[in-house]
Image (spheres, rainbow, N blue to C red):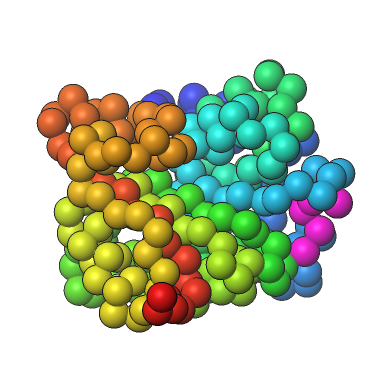
Amino acid sequence: MGHKKKLQHFAENKTFPHFFEPTFTELNEGFKLKGSWSHGFFKNDNPVIVELGCGKGEYTVGLAKRYPDKNFIGIDRKGARMWRGAKTSFEDKMNNVAFVRTWIELIPFIFGMDEVEEIWITFPDPQPKDKTQRKRLTSPRFLDLYRNFLKPGGKIHLKTDSDFLYEYTLNLVQKNGYSLLFSTNQLYDSDWDGDAIAFTTFYETGFLEQGIPIKYLQFTLAQKTDG
């Protein structure tokens, strides 16, 4: 994407009523919608679902169309990419979608305790090097951040092309005794019929064309119980 086009997208993002770009000052002073997304913005009591690293917002918008009785918020730093999902949802007059441009490390400033029902992590950078392991969106560091706003028993979905990230996350879930709800390293050859196969993202299409298997994990941070 050319520089001029990016600037156009950045400018248009500012015109969307459901697109937020809080500054560090605004976050430190208290983001106005923290803890009140349902009532303060969506004007309902519906569950809030978040897509982290949402990119073009395919899952944010796709799930919002599929579940009009739920609220969906896409989080990313790439404003030019997010523009696509923001524009589509604006033009389609969707009232259960929002986007927040911020660092994922800062999301505890965006959401209040127990405010989020589910988290979707779709095709994140696997960060395979040891020196960047803290940047993995399923690392202990990030899972601890999610506890700040994810409801007890709230689901976390990971969809990835990376064997490394899939195995890393699966091992982490098992090691910590979290509740593993479903896992497969061959999503489209499995018997899963849930939302993970309902939409194909821009990057996922490319992976599938290359014959790369798609992996999927669904788990909660609740401790697994026997019996």
Q: Position of residue 67 (x, y in %)?
A: 64, 34
Q: Looking at the picture, tell me which residue is in the foreground, 94 or 55.
A: 94
Say left or right for 36 vs 58.
Answer: right
Q: Does residue 80 sit above or below 90 in this rendering? A: below
- Identify the image quadrant of the C terminus: bottom left
Residue beneath the point at 68% across and 37% down: 97
Q: Looking at the picture, tell me which residue is in the foreground, 127 or 95.
A: 95
Residue beneath the point at 77% across and 64% down: 35
* Quarter occupied by residue 44: top right
Q: Position of residue 74 (x, y in %)?
A: 57, 45
Residue 179 seen in the figure: yes
Q: Position of residue 162 (x, y in %)?
A: 21, 51
- Identify the image quadrant of the N terminus: top left
The span shown in magenta is: 35-39
Q: Does residue 141 sit above or below 35 in this rendering? A: below
Q: Does residue 164 sit above or below 132 in this rendering? A: above
Name the main secondary structure of what is drawn in magenta. Answer: helix
Residue 161 seen in the figure: no
Say left or right for 23 vs 85.
Answer: right
Residue beneath the point at 46% across and 38% down: 195
In reply to whether residue 129 is colored magenta, the answer given is no
Q: Does residue 122 sit above or below 30 in this rendering? A: above
Residue beneath the point at 61% across and 50% down: 49
